[in-house]
Image: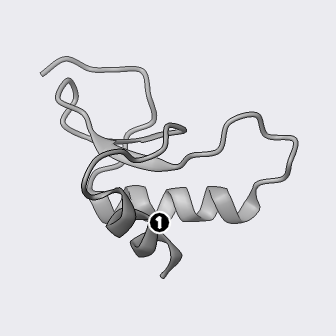
Amino acid sequence: MTDCTKIKYPNRPAAIQAMKAIVAATTTERPKIPRSIYPCSRCMAWHLTSQEPKGKGARRWNAALRS
């Protein structure tokens, strides 16, 4: 297992909770706002990304974040 330098979240719910907290506290001064999470195959943890979710699950993902 290779370690990476990004902030690690132990599981999907923890990453979602962190992303929601960051988005709620974000001002317009922040250049990048997290928009999605993903599992990392290098460190086996979850990370945030500012890239929009893509693919079939994007609509379902966006709805889940609003709840």
Residue at horizontal 64 percent and vertical 56 percent from the top: 22
Of the pair 66 and 47, the residue shown nearer to us: 66
The image shows a total of numbered marks equal to: 1
Badge 1 density bin: few <14, some 14–19, many ≥20, Cα 10 Å: few
Disc 1, SS: helix
Residue 2 lies, in percent from the top left, at 19, 17
29 lies above or below 1: below
Residue 25 position in % (x across, y down): 75, 61
Q: How is the image coloured?
A: one colour
Task: Say which quadrant the N terminus sits in.
Answer: top left
Answer above or below: position of 5 versus 40.
Answer: above
Identify which residue is drawn at 42% across, 21% down: 5
The residue shown at (31%, 43%) is 38
In the depicted view, which residue is nearer to us: 58 or 12? 58
Position of 5 compared to 10: left or right? right
Q: Which amino acid does label 1 sit on?
A: Gln
Q: Residue furthest left?
A: 1
Q: Tell which of 50 and 15 is nearer to you.
A: 50
Residue closest to the eye, 25 or 10:
25
Residue holding disc 1:
17
Q: Where is residue 48 in the image (x, y as percent from the top left)?
A: 45, 42
> Which quadrant of the figure has residue 59?
bottom left
Residue 41 lies left or right of residue 61; in this view the side is left
User: What residue lies at 18% left-to-right and 36% top-to-bottom?
Assistant: 44
**Residue 57 image-quadrant placement:** bottom left
